[in-house]
Amino acid sequence: MKFIFVNDGSTDATLRVLEALHDFAPERFQVCDLPNNVGKAEAVRKGLLLAFESLPNYVGFWDADLATPLEVIASFGELLEQKLELEMVFGARVQMLGRVIERSPLRHYPGRVFATAASLLLGIPIYDTQCGAKLFRASPVVQSLFQEPFLDRWLLDVEIIARLIRARQGTAQAQAEKIIYEFPLEEWHDVPGSKVKPQDFARAIMGLVRIYLRYCGRRAGKASPVPSLK
């Protein structure tokens, strides 16, 4: 397993720490240094495009705060190995008995409102679009979804699904809900020090509307196309 750390224009000692990891185990750790801050969506996209170059079987992205334990990667990989029809496995923060999902109410409830809105606008019953733990089969289908920059700096998770839905619409290929699997996490911890602010919720809703109009609205067909998934 190889890790690519994307340094999104940090001004602290982050880059030095990442370079030290690379020097310690260059075959395991790689650094993608972006000199200017471009936002999560573009940082993830750049990292995945770099990952595709090594021709892996699977690629994914994980939030750097490790709210989702890295051990879950193995479970995601097993699902993709066993269910060949799947292209994507997403972590889902479902609060149920027997699971340890620690999330502050101030983030949980607005998050549920956003997730419900995203599900309605996308037209598929997805529970948690924004969990920062996702693994993809490194197929041409998946690679095509990352060729163009995303509309929103943060909502790449929703836009990935919207691009897939739009590309598959009206075709005989398996639709998004058939190739995405949501994996209920057994453990997730809300890490203190998050940069998410209350006003970000309003921005997220506006970003969701932009994504809907581009990919899912009645005029979506007039927008510049997403790369073909042939």
Image: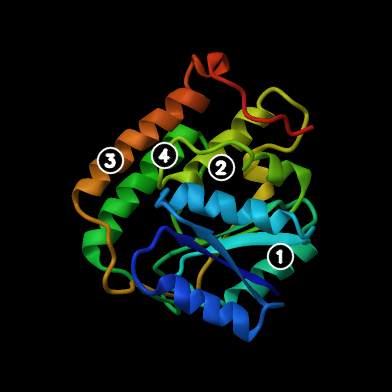
Give the mark toward the camera: 2 or 4: 4
Q: Residue 160, which numbered label? A: 2
At label 3, the amino acid type is: Arg
At label 4, the amino acid type is: Asp
At label 1, the amino acid type is: Leu
| Left or right position of 99 against 86 | left
Sequence-first disc among 3 and 4: 4
Compute the Cα span from label 3 to label 2: 18 Å
Residue nearest the observer in this picture, 153 or 178:
153
Question: Residue tagged by mark 4?
Answer: 152
Sequence-first disc among 1 and 4: 1
Q: Is residue 67 visible?
A: no
Give the mark toward the camera: 2 or 1: 2
Compute the Cα span from label 1 to label 4: 30 Å
Find residue 218 and report its horizontal and vertical position in percent. 49, 15
Sequence-first disc among 2 and 4: 4
Secondary structure of the residue carrying tag 2 is: helix
Give the mark toward the camera: 1 or 4: 4
Find residue 50 and report its horizontal and vertical position in percent. 66, 55
Residue nearest the observer in this picture, 7 or 141:
7
